[in-house]
Image: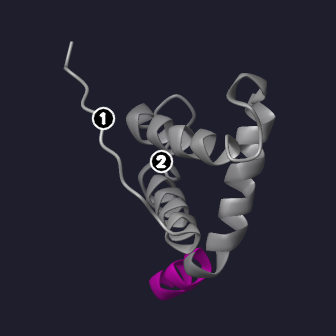
C-alpha cells in the first residue's frame, strides 16, 4: 500500500471555487466520454472528495449524505457551464 502524505493548502473563497470548477471540468473531460463502469475511478473519487470537503463547510461531516455531495457537484457544474459550452463550441 502506498504511503499517503497530507498537505495543507490555503485558498481564498474565490480560488477554491475556481479549483472546484477546474476539477469538475477535468473529470468531465476524463470520464464524460466513458460508459458506466468504464470511468477512471481515481478521478471521480478525487472530485467527490473535494465536493465532500465543500459540503463540510455547510454540514457536519457525519450528516453529509450522497445527495449533499451531488448538490455541491451540481452547483459547481452550473458555475462551470459557460466554460464547458465555450470548449464544446470550439470543437465544432
Residue depicted at 42% across the width and 42% down the height: 43
Quadrant including the N terminus = top left
Residue depicted at 25% across the width and 26% down the height: 4
Relative height, residue 40 to residue 23 (above, below): above
The residue range painted magenta reads: 84-92
Q: Nearer the viewer, residue 9 or 70?
A: 9
- Whether residue 56 sits left or right of residue 86 in the image: it is right
Q: x and y percent of residue 50 in the render?
A: 53, 45
- Name the residue carrying label 2: 31
Q: Nearer the viewer, residue 90 or 14?
A: 14
Q: x and y percent of residue 15 in the render?
A: 49, 71
- Whether residue 60 sits left or right of residue 47 in the image: it is right
Q: How is the image coloured?
A: one colour
Q: x and y percent of residue 8 in the render?
A: 35, 47
Q: Residues within 10 Å of mark 2 (few under 14, many from 20)?
A: some
Q: Nearer the viewer, residue 83 or 71?
A: 71
The chief SS type of the magenta part is: helix
Q: State how many labels appear.
A: 2
Q: Residues within 10 Å of mark 1 (few under 14, many from 20)?
A: few
Which disc, if any, is residue 6? Answer: 1
Relative height, residue 20 to residue 40 (above, below): below
Q: Residue furthest left?
A: 2
Label 1: state its secondary structure.
loop
Residue depicted at 47% across the width and 47% down the height: 31
Q: Work out how far the residue at label 2 is from the one at label 1, CA to CA, in angstroms.
A: 26 Å
Res 42 → quadrant? top left
Amino acid at each position: 500500500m502506498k504511503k499517503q502524505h497530507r498537505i495543507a493548502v490555503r485558498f481564498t473563497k474565490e480560488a477554491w471555487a475556481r479549483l472546484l470548477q477546474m476539477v469538475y471540468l477535468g473529470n468531465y473531460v476524463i470520464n464524460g466520454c466513458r460508459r458506466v463502469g468504464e470511468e477512471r475511478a481515481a478521478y471521480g473519487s478525487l472530485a467527490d472528495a473535494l465536493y465532500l470537503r465543500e459540503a463540510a463547510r455547510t454540514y457536519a461531516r457525519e450528516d453529509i449524505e450522497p445527495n449533499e455531495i451531488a448538490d455541491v457537484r451540481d452547483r459547481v457544474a452550473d458555475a462551470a457551464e459557460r466554460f464547458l459550452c465555450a470548449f464544446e463550441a470550439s470543437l465544432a
